[in-house]
Image: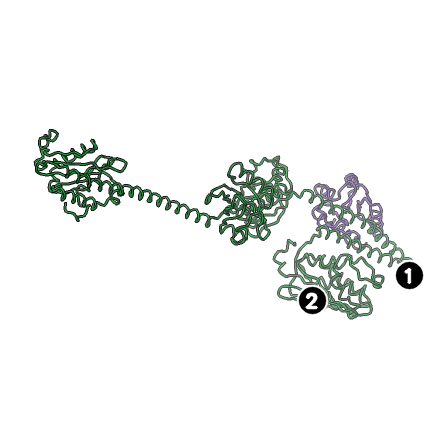
Chain colours: A green, B purple
């Protein structure tokens, strides 16, 4: 093999590679260097063949050779080389064979072209066998002492070279290992740094020695409000992070005992004073040989808040005295509170297997479906009757509204047992009825007797007695009015003012009342202006009561005037009736109050104009219940105009008033 | 002999006042203060018109009216219900009364109502 050829093309080298199987030897033992030695051995000893074999784990392997190329295919030559090389390795001594041909050991594989062999071991400084330097000739040759010395010199140099190479190889391998380890560490560090900085959890590293913060991540900055610069070098205590110092003490104690703590709930104070609830985990780690504490805080404030709110609502629902039901649109009950269980007498499981149709006292499903549709829309408040497990029924007021819950459309219904309220309403009704009866019965007989007396007096033609009787009757009528007003107020207060709606002619009504009242108002002329084209819908008696009230007031409070004007007006939406007098008027400060219950104008007029002050309160209530308004425009000394409006759209629903 | 009017009212004063008013106009009047006695009286006396109060202690005028209107023998007798009850008018209608007379009333109104009923009887 000519020197200068690339080592990789050498079959011997291929063999070495195959045997070693690694890249390390190749890189640290450049074949070129060994080739120079084999070349030199060949030239100095004047032999055609020379080779260096190196002992590896698999045995001696020819690393470099000269003159072996042309006979490489003749395996016998290589085999005999190996044979002698192995002998050198085994003996650890030079092997000098002047004529190899008679050697019995190679008789089996006659080697016509190798006739003499000389090999010396390559030994390390410590005596370790590194390999063998071999030379061979085609002719038998008597090896001289000079030959041997030369070989041994060469061997020493090669050994030194190999030893150096091996050492360097080991060094390099070690270096590479270190490098790999460093890379791995680097990767691990990078990973840690990335994790540290990008973690959605709060991460801090504190020195175990003094508790000062060495590092904090971005989440720490974002959640606590402290910047990195503010935090580093300070302790969590200095930052006032721990809300309860006891938590910190316990955490530290656990850390000392176990070297780590895991998911301990604690509260922390943020820079802005807000409190964060977090699960705290910590572990003692070593950084640069120093013990440090890696702390992880998982902010669960939101979850905590959500849990608190949930708990609050659960409590609210469970402890509520009202029945709370969650109902699916198909009527199925999916949630019920304790009040529901008690009210209906079913256990929870049974209740949750029922439908709202099972709880309603007999009523059509069409009606329920319509109510559910309205509840789902804008919410609904209505009264109905529900049925208990034992079949008994009770009145309920239902407030129901639709809501999205877990992606499902449900109705949230709050039901109140109104048995007591109903009883109270009945009692109020009864009271009003009894009071009405008890108060009016004596008035009834007093009035009849007064009238019977008048008939007799008329026959006796006793004028003064007739006048006294007039007074008596007037007082009975006045007392009757007061009783009626008080009863009306009771009804309004009890919410029991019932209106009977029907279409009627308001114009006729006004004319009738004016005709009735005109004879008693001898100083005033009552004038009717305007007209109404359409009938109105409402309670004729009650609206008449309002008109009468306004007219009697007008007459009463305009003693010096001689006219009262009633105006009727038709607008597209409303009918408007106003009563104008030219009397004493009402001070601006009192104008809003005169519609209040029991309000009476203060001062001297109190004595001048007696009464309970209920008329305008009742009138405004009656008009309000019809969906209209009653108001006044007045100027003291010039008179007042009371006006009420009634909406025309009531005509659409004549049978029901709110 | 004038038309026979039966006045049923647990308030003696009202019963007397009505009675006097009607007698003055030539009617024959009998009064009862106890609703339970109406049946006997109706059997024996067969009035032309009955004037009933609604709220009588122990007995409801509406119940009397309803039963009178249920019985073949008494169905044709006109009934006037007179009451100070807030819902007297509708109660009278429900009970099947022919007329309603709110208390207190003018005697002229009483006489009108009774005259109408007596005429139809």
The CA span between labels 2 and 1 is 42 Å
- Residue that extends furthest to the front in the rendered view of this protein: A145
Considering the numbered disc 2 on the image, is that residue within a helix, a strand or a loop?
Answer: strand
Q: Is residue A613 above or below residue A430?
A: below
Q: Position of residue A458 (x, y in %)?
A: 88, 58
Numbered circles on residues, count: 2
Front in this rendered view, residue A441 or A19: A19
Badge 1 marks a residue whose secondary structure is helix
Q: Which residue is mark 2?
A: A568
Of A243 and A232, which appears nearest the observer?
A232
Q: Going by the image, does A340 lie left or right of B99?
A: left
Residue A124, given in percent of the width and then of the height, sits at 26, 38
Few, some or many residues within 10 Å of mark 1 (<14, 14–19, 20+) = few
Is residue A82 shown to the viewer in this render?
A: yes
A524 sits to left or right of A66: right
Chain letter behind tag 1: A
Please name the residue shown 16% across and 47% down the image.
A3
Image location of residue A390, percent across then percent down: 62, 35
Which quarter of the image is occupied by the N terminus of chain A?
Answer: top left
- The answer to the question of whether label 2 and label 1 lie on touching residues, with beta carbons closer than 8 A, is no
Q: Chain of mark 2?
A: A
Q: Residues within 10 Å of mark 2 (few under 14, many from 20)?
A: some
Of mark 2 and mark 1, the one earlier in the sequence is 1
Q: Nearer the viewer, residue A223 or A441?
A: A223
Q: Which mark is residue A463?
A: 1
Q: Nearer the viewer, mark 2 or mark 1?
A: 2
> Considering depth in this image, is A238 or B83 the residue closer to the camera?
A238
- Does residue B48 appear in the picture of this structure? no
Q: Residue furthest top?
A: A104
């Amino acid at each position: 093999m000519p020197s200068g050829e690339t080592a990789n093309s050498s079959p011997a080298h291929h063999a070495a590679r195959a045997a070693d199987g690694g890249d390390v030897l190749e890189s640290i033992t450049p074949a070129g260097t060994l080739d120079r030695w084999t070349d030199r051995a060949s030239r100095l000893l004047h032999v055609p063949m020379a080779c260096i074999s190196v002992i590896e784990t698999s045995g001696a392997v020819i690393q470099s050779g000269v003159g072996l190329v042309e006979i490489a295919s003749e395996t016998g030559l290589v085999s005999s080389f190996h044979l002698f090389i192995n002998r050198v390795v085994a003996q650890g001594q030079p092997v000098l064979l002047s004529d190899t041909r008679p050697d019995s050991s190679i008789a089996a594989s006659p080697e016509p072209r190798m006739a003499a062999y000389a090999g010396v071991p390559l030994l390390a400084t410590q005596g370790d066998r590194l390999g063998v330097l071999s030379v061979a000739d085609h002719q038998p040759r008597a090896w001289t002492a000079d030959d041997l010395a030369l070989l041994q010199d060469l061997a020493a140099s090669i050994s030194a070279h190999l030893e150096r190479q091996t050492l360097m190889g080991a060094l390099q391998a070690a270096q590479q290992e270190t490098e790999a380890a460093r890379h791995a560490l680097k990767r691990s560090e990078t990973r840690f740094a990335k994790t540290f900085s990008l973690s959605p959890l709060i991460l801090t590293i504190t020195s175990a020695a003094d508790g000062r913060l060495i590092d904090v991540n971005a989440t720490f900055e974002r959640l606590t409000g402290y910047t990195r610069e503010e935090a580093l070098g300070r302790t969590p205590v200095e930052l006032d992070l721990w809300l309860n110092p006891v938590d910190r003490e316990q955490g530290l104690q656990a850390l000392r005992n176990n070297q780590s703590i895991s998911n301990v709930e604690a509260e922390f104070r943020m820079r802005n004073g807000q409190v964060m609830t977090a699960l705290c985990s910590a572990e003692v780690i070593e950084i640069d040989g120093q013990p440090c504490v890696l702390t992880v805080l998982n902010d669960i404030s939101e979850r905590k808040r959500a849990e608190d709110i949930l708990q609050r609502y659960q409590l609210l629902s469970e402890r509520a005295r009202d029945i709370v039901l969650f109902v699916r649109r198909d009527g199925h009950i999916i949630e019920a509170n304790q009040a529901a269980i008690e009210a209906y007498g079913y256990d929870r499981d049974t209740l949750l297997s029922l439908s709202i149709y099972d709880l309603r006292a007999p009523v059509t499903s069409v009606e329920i479906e319509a109510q559910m549709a309205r509840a789902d829309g804008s919410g609904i408040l209505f009264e109905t009757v529900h049925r208990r497990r034992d079949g008994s029924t009770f009145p309920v007021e239902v407030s129901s509204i639709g809501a999205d819950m877990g992606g499902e459309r449900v109705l949230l219904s709050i039901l109140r047992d109104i048995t007591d309220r109903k009883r109270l309403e009945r009692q109020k009704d009864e009271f009003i009825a009894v009071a009405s009866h008890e108060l009016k019965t004596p008035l009834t007989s007093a009035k009849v007797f007064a009238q019977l007396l008048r008939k007799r007096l008329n026959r006796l033609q006793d004028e003064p007695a007739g006048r006294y009787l007039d007074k008596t009757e007037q007082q009975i009528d006045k007392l009757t009015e007061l009783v009626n007003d008080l009863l009306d107020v009771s009804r309004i207060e009890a919410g029991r003012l019932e209106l009977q709606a029907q279409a009627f002619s308001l114009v006729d009504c006004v004319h009738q009342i004016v005709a009735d009242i005109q004879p008693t108002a001898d100083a005033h002329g009552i004038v009717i202006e305007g007209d109404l084209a359409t009938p109105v819908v409402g309670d004729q008696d009650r609206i008449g009561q309002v008109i009468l009230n306004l007219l009697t007031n007008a007459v009463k409070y305009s003693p010096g005037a001689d006219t009262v004007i009633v105006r009727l007006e038709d607008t597209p939406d409303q009918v408007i009736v106003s009563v104008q007098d030219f009397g004493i008027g009402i001070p601006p400060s009192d104008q809003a109050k005169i519609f209040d219950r029991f309000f009476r104008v203060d001062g001297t007029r109190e004595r001048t104009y007696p009464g309970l002050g209920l008329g305008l309160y009742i009138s405004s209530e009656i008009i309000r219940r019809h969906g209209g308004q009653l108001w006044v425009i007045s100027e003291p000394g010039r008179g007042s105009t009371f006006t009420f409006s009634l909406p025309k759209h009531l005509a659409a629903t004549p049978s029901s008033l709110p | 002999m004038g038309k026979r009017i039966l006045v049923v009212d647990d308030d003696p004063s009202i019963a007397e006042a009505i009675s006097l008013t009607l007698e003055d106009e030539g009617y024959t009047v009998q009064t009862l203060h106890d609703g339970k006695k109406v049946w006997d009286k109706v059997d024996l006396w067969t009035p032309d018109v009955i004037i009933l109060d609604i709220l009588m202690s122990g007995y409801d005028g509406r119940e009397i009216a309803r039963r009178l209107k249920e019985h073949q023998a008494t169905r044709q007798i006109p009934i006037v219900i007179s009451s100070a009850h807030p819902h007297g008018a509708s109660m009278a209608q429900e009970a099947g009364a022919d007329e309603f007379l709110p208390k207190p009333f003018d005697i002229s109104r009483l006489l009108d109502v009774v005259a109408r009923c007596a005429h139809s009887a």
